[in-house]
Amino acid sequence: MLRKLIVLALLTSLSSGALAQGNIFLRTNDHDYQLTKIHSDLYFFSVNVEFAAPLVPGVYNNPDVVMISLWVRGNLAPGTPSGLADFDHPWAFSGTEFYNRGGSLRFEVSDAAVLSDGIQVSELVGDGVVLTVDNREIDYGTYHSAIFELRADGTGRIQNSNNIVTLDPLNEVDFGEEYIADLRFDPGNTTIFTNVRLTDIDTRQIGSGSISVLDLFVMLTLMLVFLYRAQHEKCRAIRE
């Protein structure tokens, strides 16, 4: 449980300084879709992105983002490359770190999009894949980093990306070798971009776990960072 709480604390510390600027968020999880398990048993995922500026119609190819988090959880079929029985991996990065590790983010907002009620999938441009969030990682020892895709026809897929687990020795995993789940949804009624705060994540995402010395150290560090930033903002306001 504490590991999940730490991730939520990290999201708070990363996003708290920009919320007042009216930033836009990509927020979605498995509750938004009809999930069909194709390979292994992915039973939970969430994708959250905070953009550095409000969205307007146009093409977004690796846009500037404040933070991005992905979370995948499931049981693995026998014989996958990782050799594990299950996986439960939350990732939370700044936008710069996400791209530097090998990730990418692509979509296009239609000129006809009505931005006042968020952006629905039907307001993204394209006949095929209209949104890709690819958490590919290169040489970080990870098999399960996900690629999340939505299509204009109301279908989609989340699966492990083509991660390069290690460069030396070269150890690669191809798309879907660990897990695949297909998605179905209503493009006109699925709001993918919103101004809802990232910290309002469903409490169901918090699972069970045990406390370790590392957990305590990380949580205390995040608390100190949060308090420092709050005091810094207060001092700056006084000076101004």
Image (spheres, helix red, strand yellow):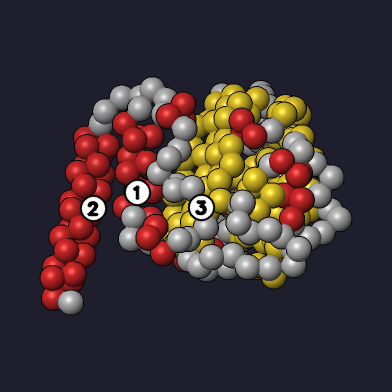
Rate crowding at label 3 as few (under 14), some (14 to 19) or many (20 or more) other CA atoms within 10 Å: some
Q: Earlier in the sequence, mark 3 or mark 2?
A: 3
Of the residues shown, which amino acid type is indicated by label 1?
Answer: Thr
Q: Is residue 157 left or right of residue 117?
A: right
Contact between marks 2 and 1 (CB within 8 A): the answer is: yes
Mark nearer the viewer, 1 or 3: 3
In the orientation shown, which residue stands out farthest toward the bottom? 240
Q: Is residue 28 above or below residue 126?
A: above
For the point 21% across and 47% down, the residue is 223
Residue assigned mark 2: 226
Of the residues shown, which amino acid type is indicated by label 3?
Answer: Asn
Image-quadrant location for residue 45: top right
For the point 22% across and 55% down, the residue is 225
Q: Is residue 66 left or right of residue 161?
A: left
Q: Earlier in the sequence, mark 2 or mark 1?
A: 1
The answer for how far apart the CA atoms under marks 2 and 1 are is 8 Å
Residue assigned mark 1: 12
Can I make out residue 100 in this image? no
Residue assigned mark 3: 195
